[in-house]
Image (cartoon, rainbow, N blue to C red):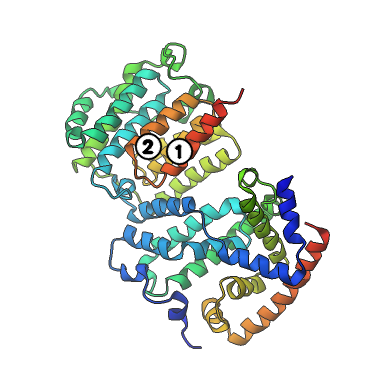
């Protein structure tokens, strides 16, 4: 399989340029380059809103500890794998405590205080996350990377470590499941 | 109900349109600036990993160490012993000294250090802090725990903390933090944050007390100080929380946590206006 990591991570970014800097400088560069990516990924992979802040920090703390092991230019690939594991751990713990559904941000205190536009945006994201729950983990990862992060199939294949054909089939099934679940929840009005 | 109308409005879209709308909202989603700032502070501090200065280095400015010293004294004195106005004033004085006369700080520290009382060297026990104690109004000396807690030991203990920092700043003391201890630090702060989110200020303060006792030179102690302000405010001691916040803001004007602290102060202010 072709190596698309450079495509994924883009041109040499701040984090790569500063690879020889001190650890805290490298960590800051890593966050500046990739925080939004990690944040969105955690949100869409089922980490409740209230836990995303801590989860994102966990991802970057792990990455910071592993800085010497991260190949320059492949930071995003490492962060993706770490984010997946952190999200899976959080979801597992939540299921164990049977709090997952209750903790989804439906009517949080914070959202009540936000302006109308922000509130609608949060509710839309909450609705989207409920739709995404219908997808199994494999489908959801591919769907999020393709449809939200707008990565190409070869890029997703490189990131996830699966053949391009598998990306295509998972994406096809994910789109069908997504559309069906969206219609179902829309009909329920929730 | 306007919020519900807004929610209903996007559900009125046709399925295909709704799908594109939701995906576009998700594509434009980004991390809150405050979350990014917290990560920058905490992770960069953790990256340094060792040493008394690690948490402070995130602030970048050469004068930040001196300012931080003033703040840490304020935190120790005011939050650690629930003492009254005298300790707060002393802490603020140190903070002002740090702000306006950074070059003279080591001298001042040495003077205070010489007053250290031996009995005050033991780490503060979690049980010494209770919601009742933290809810004491520091502007009313004599009616609070200051009556049962001698002021002198409190000041002396604060001075000991000050002395440690002074020695550290002169390179005489190096407290190392193992990487594994960072996980424990994070765990305690996460406990405090979780307790705060559930409005359990007493539990948050206990977790912060344990953090203070176990990691007096922890990498995340500035974050712990910020959490303590929120906890004290949530416990009902608005005056102390506001004073701690003011001291924090004057000591760390460029801290990434200032927005959070100001929001806490605003929340306290708005609460205070309620009947």
Residue sitting nearer the eye, B137 or B202: B137
Q: Which sits in the foreground, B18 or B119?
A: B18
Q: Which residue is at a point 63% across and 59% down the rendered structure image?
A: A91
The picture places residue B96, in percent across and down from the top left corner, at 28, 30
Nearest to N terminus: mark 1 or mark 2: 2
Where is the C terminus of chain B found, in terms of image quarters? top right
Q: Chain of mark 1?
A: B
Measured Cα–Cα span from mark 1 to mark 2: 8 Å
Residue B128 location in percent, x, y?
Answer: 46, 25
- Seen in the picture, residue B134 relative to B176 is either above or below; the reply is above
Provide the residue designation for mark 1. B262
Which residue sits at x=20%, y=33%?
B101
Determine which of the numbered discs, if any, sits on residue A190 in the image. none
Asked whether the viewer can see residue B163, the reply is: no
Q: Which residue is mark 2?
A: B249
Q: Secondary structure at mark 1?
A: helix
Q: Are marks 1 and 2 on the same chain?
A: yes
Q: Disc 1 vs disc 2: Cβ atoms closer than 8 Å?
A: yes
Residue shown at 68% from the left, 63% from the top: A128
Would you place residue B46 above or below residue B267 in this image?
below
Q: Position of residue A14 (x, y in %)?
A: 35, 68
Q: Residues within 10 Å of mark 1 (few under 14, many from 20)?
A: some
B100, above or below B142, in the image: below
Residue A3 in view in this figure: yes
Quadrant location, the N terminus of chain B: top right
Report helix, strand or loop for mark 2: helix
Residue at x-position 35% and y-position 71%: A16
In front: A168, or B269?
B269
Q: Where does the image place residue A141, in percent across and percent down from the top left?
A: 61, 71
């Amino acid at each position: 399989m072709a190596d698309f990591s450079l495509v994924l991570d883009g041109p040499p970014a701040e984090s790569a340029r500063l690879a020889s800097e001190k650890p805290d400088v490298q960590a800051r560069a890593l966050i500046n380059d990739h925080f939004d990516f990690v944040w969105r990924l955690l949100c869409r992979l089922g980490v409740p809103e209230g836990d995303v802040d801590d989860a994102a920090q966990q991802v970057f703390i792990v990455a910071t500890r592993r800085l010497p092991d991260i190949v320059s230019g492949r930071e995003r690939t490492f962060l993706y794998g770490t984010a997946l594991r952190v999200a899976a751990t959080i979801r597992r713990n939540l299921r164990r405590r049977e709090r997952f559904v209750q903790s989804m941000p439906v009517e949080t205190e914070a959202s009540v205080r936000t302006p109308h536009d922000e509130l609608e945006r949060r509710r839309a994201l909450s609705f989207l996350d409920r739709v995404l729950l219908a997808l199994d983990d494999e489908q959801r990862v591919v769907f999020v990377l393709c449809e939200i992060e707008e990565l190409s199939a070869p890029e997703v294949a490189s990131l996830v470590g699966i053949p391009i054909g598998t990306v295509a089939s998972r994406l096809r099934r994910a789109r069908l499941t997504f559309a069906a679940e969206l219609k179902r929840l829309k009909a329920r009005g929730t | 109900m306007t919020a519900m109308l807004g929610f209903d409005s996007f559900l009125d879209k046709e399925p295909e349109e709704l799908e594109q709308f939701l995906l576009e909202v998700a594509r434009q989603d980004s991390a809150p600036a405050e979350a990014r700032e917290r990560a920058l502070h905490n992770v960069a501090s953790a990256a340094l990993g060792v040493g008394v200065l690690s948490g402070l280095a995130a602030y970048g400015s050469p004068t930040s160490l001196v300012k931080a010293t003033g703040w840490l004294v304020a935190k120790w004195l005011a939050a650690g012993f629930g003492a009254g106005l005298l300790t707060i004033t002393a802490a603020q004085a140190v903070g002002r000294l740090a702000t306006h006369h950074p070059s003279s700080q080591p001298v001042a520290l040495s003077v205070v250090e010489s007053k250290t009382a031996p009995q005050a060297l033991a780490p503060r026990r979690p049980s010494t802090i209770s919601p009742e104690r933290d809810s004491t109004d520091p502007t009313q000396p004599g009616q609070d725990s200051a009556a049962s807690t001698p002021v002198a030991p409190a000041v002396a203990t604060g001075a000991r903390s000050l002395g440690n920092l002074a020695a550290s700043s002169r390179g005489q003391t190096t407290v190392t933090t193992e990487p594994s201890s960072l996980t424990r630090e994070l765990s305690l702060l996460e406990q405090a944050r979780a307790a705060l989110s559930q409005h359990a200020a007493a539990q948050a303060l206990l977790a912060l007390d344990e953090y203070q006792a176990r990691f007096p030179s922890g990498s995340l102690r500035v974050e712990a100080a910020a959490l303590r302000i929120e906890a004290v405010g949530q416990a009902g001691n608005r005056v102390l929380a506001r004073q701690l916040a003011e001291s924090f803001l004057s000591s760390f004007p460029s801290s990434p946590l200032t927005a959070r602290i100001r929001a806490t102060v605003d929340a306290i202010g708005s609460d205070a206006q309620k009947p």
